[in-house]
Image (cartoon, grey):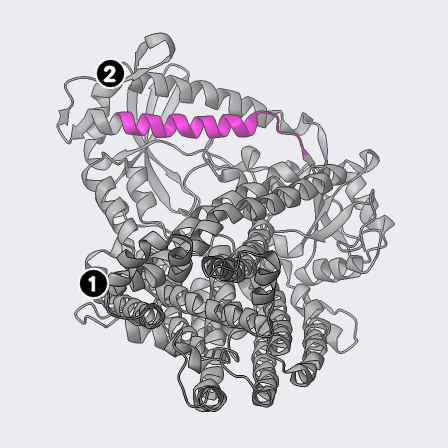
Amino acid sequence: MSIVPPEKQLAKISLIGIVSQFGINVTLGIGMLVLFSFLRPRNSIVYSPKQFASEDKQPPKIEENKLWGWVKPVLKEEEHLLIKEIGLDAVMFIRFIKLCQNVFLCLFMFGICIIIPINIFGTYRDNNYNIPNDNPLQILSVSYLGRANWFWAHSVFTWIFSLIIYWFIYKEYSNYNKLRMEYFKSDEYRNSLHSRTLLITGLPYSMQSDKGLVEYIELIKIKFPVSEAVIARDVGKLPNLVIEREAAVRGLEEALVKYLIGPNKVADKRPRINLLFGAKFDSIEFYTNKIEIIETDINKLRENSAQGKALNYGFVSFESMLHAHSAARQLDSIPSVGMRHKSFNAPTVQLAPMPKDIIWGSLSMPVAVRNTQRWVGRLFFLSLCFLWLIPLGFITTAAQIRNIVKIFPFLKELLYEHDVITGIIESWITPLILAVFVIILPIILRYLTKAQGIITNSESERSVLGKLYLFFFVNNLILYTITSIAWDIVTKIKVSIDAGYLDLNDIKKDLFNSKFLDEIAESVIKVSFFWINYISLSGLFAAWDLAQFVQLIYIWFKKKILSPTPRNLKELSIPQGFDYPVYYNIHLFFFTVGILYSVIAPLILLFCYLYYTLAYLVYRYQLMYVFNTKIETGGIYWKAVFNRLIFAIIFWQLTMIGVMNLKGAHVQSIVVIPLIFFTLIVKLYCLSKFDKSTKYYKSDAERAGKSITKDDIIEKGKRKEQHIFNKFGHPALTAELIIPMIHANVKNQLKIVYNNSRITETTTASRNGKSKPIILVEDGDHILKIQPIEKNELYFFDKYDFNMGYTSAFDTQSILSSDRFGDNTVSSSTDDIPWQHPPKQ
């Protein structure tokens, strides 16, 4: 039996839990950083795949002979260079982490120097200089403050902290506005076709033609001349055929790797494939024939694409980016066509997204169907929030050892005899279970969001961010706190019954005594220690994320155990896409929790600051050397982040009002109320000052109230000739068909594989303008192209290699094919465009 009384044992468990968990996390985190520093120069494909990028996109060089040589280049790289290397989206994420770090540094200095001493002194005074036994760390919070006068300090610091946060987010919005303007002015954006193109959706049947698009633009009185207009057409089963062909190409590559096992060696038997009813076929012949058949069907459908049914959306391009943005800004203010005020049947006009950003299957969806699917998706999301309460209840139970002991007394001796293990279970295992449990959540929300008919991947990702944050806020913060309070009430009833108070009136009297409201406030504050443990554990996850152990093992297994094809090996060197919704949500949630307890339990500020300091280093490295932004939006995530920061601030201020009222500080809580209106004023002021200028580009002349001049427009000769059909045609019509790859050292063995075919070598132009070797396997009227890959090309990519297949092509690429089956020429004549509207004079 333990000789320590249960009350002191609980305090000991809580204190040991936090200290031991922090010690374990620090030890493991430092170990992971050291191991990462050792492994990094020896595994470039895992830890620095972006070093293989084109020269202008390569990150700074790192001194490989120094264990910590990677830290200085990561922290010293200037922001304007970072924007060129990793894009504005990545830079804004790094800036957001830095913003949180700066905020919590300022709040922590006030908290450690002023608020915590006030809480300790007030606790001693109000408890006759006796330290309460529940949890020694709670004397750092307002838990044991009895007199309302102490809360004048907390009201004042709620104001001070709010003003500090207002300043930081206003400055960040102002900086974002400047960076966004520079993004609009960059050559990369100004020279892109989508910067001077409008997307029009929901067109009525009478306008579903190339000329109908222009007539609509003239109808709504756009004064700028239209360069091109193209209506979209139905592509039928073509997308499925392209995907099916890619699967056949990959199947052929796998069969060739299994058969061609060396420069002068083949396997004893040709690989075979099992089909339905036990039929077996030669894999190489099967996939070769399948590629030829599907490719013939694809070419026929592409040739007849102009006869496809016209759809209810199209693209209109202008002479310059300035014309397109001015037109979009003009239309945004018209209720019949603006995105925010669109009437039910009117077409929607907006700036065209990047072609690879478009979710093509959603563009032609009628407005009524899209609205219905969005509401159905919201209902499913709400249902998911409530269903999540079941596992959350178990997690809540495990988080409080005292609840387990009071509900299940037979575990009392076991748990209290092993306080170190129990402390670790309470403070380390429970947050770990919660963290692992939510890994599958983004996957579910992505499926749910895409089913809602959103037309771009970037908008879909922002919607996922919104759902993730709301889900975390409702389930992991609000409901967790409520259930923790409920457990405290249940355990109190259990204690009353065990004490012999079986009468309902006696239980009510004991439960709802004069200290009941104060105990509810204390329950709210006690939850802060769970979030301290959770944030501390998340620092370990950040170090784990940097170490990339899973990716390291996966690549080793793929290369050493399996038989990867050249395409598989090249894909291993392509940087992973950075999951902005997940990472933004995690750090927004920690910001919400941090400021929520910043005044009532300031100890959390230390852990928040330490976490964001580590996160700044980790994710700055990850975005510079490892991860890639899938779709560059020019930092548009900031607007979604800003709105959630405002929401978090208001919720914190409301919580402060509630806690102070529960503690009896009614007058002091009234002082905080005006802050809610100040927060709303800050939001409205930032939106009115920055929203329009970050959404649409305005030239200096327009800002000065002058008309657009020729100097504001890029001369046509300075821009690569681009056409809407080439860039905004459905990828199934325009995307380059991939060709099988083999290792170059076995190319001479192809005469054994295709012994009845004529095999010749030639070269062809690739998408980046460079020539690449091609092997032609001719069998009668059919020609199969195979690309030999040299060993030094297996771990090299450029910007054209990020999407080397078509499994996700209809959400990514849209490039006119220059390598069609049996056709190596592409015409860039304007005669290829379905309709071109002559510029107005």
Please tell me whether residue 780 is drawn above or below residue 170 in the rendered image: above
**Location of residue 163 by image quarter:** bottom right
Residue under label 1, please give it: 35
Please tell me whether residue 327 is drawn above or below residue 269 in the rendered image: below
The chief SS type of the magenta part is: helix
Q: Calculate the distance from the C-alpha at mark 2 to the C-alpha at mark 1.
A: 51 Å
**Location of residue 285 by image quarter:** top left
For the residues labelled 2 and 1, say whether their Cβ atoms are less than 8 Å apart: no
Q: At 27% from the left edge and 45% from the top edge, which residue is drawn? A: 554
Task: Depth check: give the residue in front, 87 or 23.
Answer: 23
Image quadrant holding the N terminus, namely bottom left
Left or right side of 204 for 125: left
Report crowding for label 1: few under 14, some 14 to 19, many 20 or more residues within 10 A (C-alpha). Answer: few
- Residue stretch rendered in magenta on the structure: 233-255
Please, what is the three-letter code of the amino acid marked with disc 2? Asn
Please, what is the three-letter code of the amino acid marked with disc 1? Leu
x, y percentage for residue 637?
57, 61
Please tell me whether residue 701 is drawn above or below residue 422 in the rendered image: below
Query: Is residue 513 inside the magenta stretch?
Result: no
Residue under label 2, please give it: 755
Left or right side of 549 for 401: right
Task: Depth check: give the residue in front, 394 or 770.
Answer: 394
Please tell me whether residue 137 is drawn above or below residue 589 in the rendered image: below
x, y percentage for residue 420?
25, 65
Element marked by disc 2: loop
x, y percentage for residue 573?
31, 49
x, y percentage for residue 808?
48, 39
Element marked by disc 1: helix
**Which label's residue is closer to the chain start, 2 or 1?**
1
Left or right side of 278 for 556: left
